[in-house]
Amino acid sequence: MKPQIISGFDAGSHNRDLGATVHRLRAESAYQDLSTVIVIPAFENISTRIVASWWNMMTPPNQKCVKLFAQGMEVGEAYSQTIESVVNHSELSKFKFVLTLEHDNAPPPDGLCRLQACAVAHPEFDVIGGLYFTKGHGGVAQIWGDPNEHPINFRPQLPDPNGGLRECCGTGMGFTLYRMKIFKDKKLRRPWFKTTASQQEGAATQDLYAWNDWRQHGYRCAIDCSVKVGHWDADGEVMW
């Protein structure tokens, strides 16, 4: 520190350009209630590379954030039972968001903050997910179905190379932000998430099983293509 004589009052850099500061705070949604319950199915070992990304993930300052691990359950059961317990909890049920985070997904450090800011900026969407791909060569983006096509389908859509929002008919659950109000809607089928493989129910992963019902009740979803999420293949030790 160089020698100096200090006198007078300094309001600080944030006050110096208050217009720019307000613009930044609005963009970051820091003044909103962004309370979030993070639900993590943990039915198997989790790679160090994945845990490292979780440790580096920021949460908004002065906001409530609770992490719940569901152990030893099939993924659909893990999500449904854990979120059911959240909805029935006196305090957690008051939170604004639920974030689903899976054992093989590596979000960017600011991923949660960016999904929350996107949700505040786009109230028309009830669910907003990060962009990640199915594993393996030729993997496709988990942006399931074009809502402009009829009848409803879950064909994978192209991501926006400029990082914009891409509305779809269904999302994966690897790194996905849900408004809590969805799970309080009595009209929705329960359990919300169920993996099916039968002649009666057809074949569906737990995420698209939910969206088959939710779309009929007017819920909308999108993928934020600027939030790029890795998908870890532990067997091949490749991040897709």
Image (cartoon, rainbow, N blue to C red):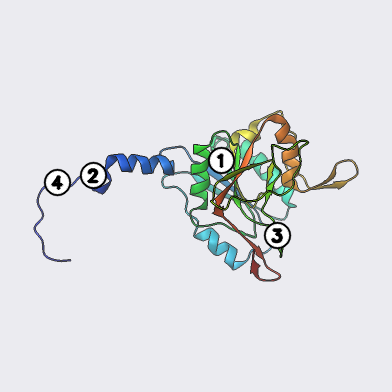
How far, Cα to Cα, is label 1 from label 2?
34 Å
Q: Earlier in the sequence, mark 2 or mark 4?
A: 4
Of circles 3 and 2, the one toward us is 3
How far, Cα to Cα, is label 3 from label 4?
58 Å
Q: Secondary structure at mark 2?
A: helix
Residue type at mark 1 is Phe
Q: Secondary structure at mark 1?
A: strand
How far, Cα to Cα, is label 4 from label 1?
41 Å
Residue lying at the far right of the rendered structure: 199
Say which quarter of the image contains residue 149: top right
Q: What residue is rendered at 73% in x and 31% in y?
A: 216
Q: Earlier in the sequence, mark 3 or mark 2?
A: 2
Disc number at residue 16? 2
Of circles 2 and 4, the one toward us is 2
Q: What residue is rendered at 52% in x and 49% in y?
A: 112
Residue hosting label 3:
139
Residue type at mark 2 is Arg
Q: Earlier in the sequence, mark 4 or mark 1?
A: 4
Of circles 3 and 1, the one toward us is 3
> What is the quadrant of the C terminus in the image?
bottom right
Query: Dot 4, how many residues are within 10 Å of its Cα: few (below 14), some (14-19), or many (20+)?
Result: few
Disc number at residue 54? none
Residue hosting label 4:
9
Say which quarter of the image contains residue 132: bottom right
Residue hosting label 1:
97
Query: Dot 1, how many residues are within 10 Å of its Cα: few (below 14), some (14-19), or many (20+)?
Result: many
Residue type at mark 3 is Gly
Is 21 on the left-hand or right-hand side of 11?
right
Residues at discs 1 and 2 in contact (Cβ within 8 Å): no
- 93 in relation to 44, above or below: above
Is 115 on the left-hand or right-hand side of 200?
left
